[in-house]
Image: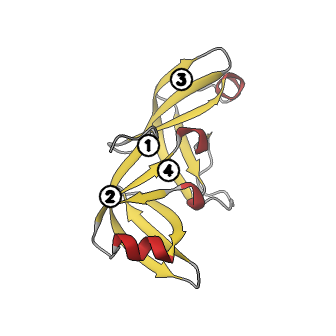
Amino acid sequence: MTLSARNVLAGKVTEVTKGQIVAKVKVDIGGQTVTSVISNEAVDDLALAVGDKVEAIIKSSEVIVAKGAAGIKISARNILAGTVTGVTKGQIVAKVKIDIGGQTVTSLISNEAVDDLALAVGAKVEAIAKSSEVIIAK
């Protein structure tokens, strides 16, 4: 299967916690954790278990870029520390590529945000995504 989503992060399931309707799935992607909230039905369909190799998928339009966000209080569960490896500006929107320890996260943000954050190659940033925006594939 080919996907339009730019962020396909390989990892291993470290936790599956079922609730009444949805489950919280934690995935180690190489020293950082991605948390996803998916339906219990999806957990069962995928037969997800701790130790499974999976992919955490996030659309680039759902990734927020921040500077100095480590340790802040925020409802988003996924705050991935990284380094900017590329910034490509379009007419309105820019594509920002971030190395998060051997894997790349791509974010689409406004050119104004790039300028406000002074984003350039080598900048230390955080890629932020809500757990409800993370798809799990196996």
Horizontal side, residue 74 vs residue 28: left or right: right
Against 85, is 68 above or below?
below
Q: Which mark is residue 46?
A: none
The residue beneath circle 3 is 120
Q: Amino acid at mark 2?
A: Gly
Q: Where is the N terminus found, in terms of image quarters?
A: top left
The residue beneath circle 4 is 80
Q: Are marks 3 and 4 in contact (CB under 8 Å)?
A: no
Distance, label 2 to label 3, CA atoms, is 28 Å
Q: Where is the C terminus found, in terms of image quarters?
A: bottom left
Q: Residue at x 33, y 75 (%)?
A: 47
Distance, label 1 to label 3, CA atoms, is 20 Å
Horizontal side, residue 8 vs residue 17: left or right: left
Dot 1: few (<14), some (14–19), or many (≥20) neighbours within 10 Å?
many
**Among the two numbered marks 2 and 3 on one chain, the one whose residue lies closer to the N terminus:** 2
Against 49, is 10 above or below?
above
**Can residue 80 be seen?**
yes
**Among the two numbered marks 1 and 4 on one chain, the one whose residue lies closer to the N terminus:** 1
The residue beneath circle 2 is 11
Q: Amino acid at mark 3?
A: Ala
Front-lying residue, 121 or 137? 137
Q: Which mark is residue 7?
A: 1
Q: Are marks 1 and 4 in contact (CB under 8 Å)?
A: no
Horizontal side, residue 101 vs residue 37: left or right: left
Percent position of residue 106, x then y: 48, 36
**Among the two numbered marks 4 and 2 on one chain, the one whose residue lies closer to the N terminus:** 2
Percent position of residue 24, x then y: 51, 73
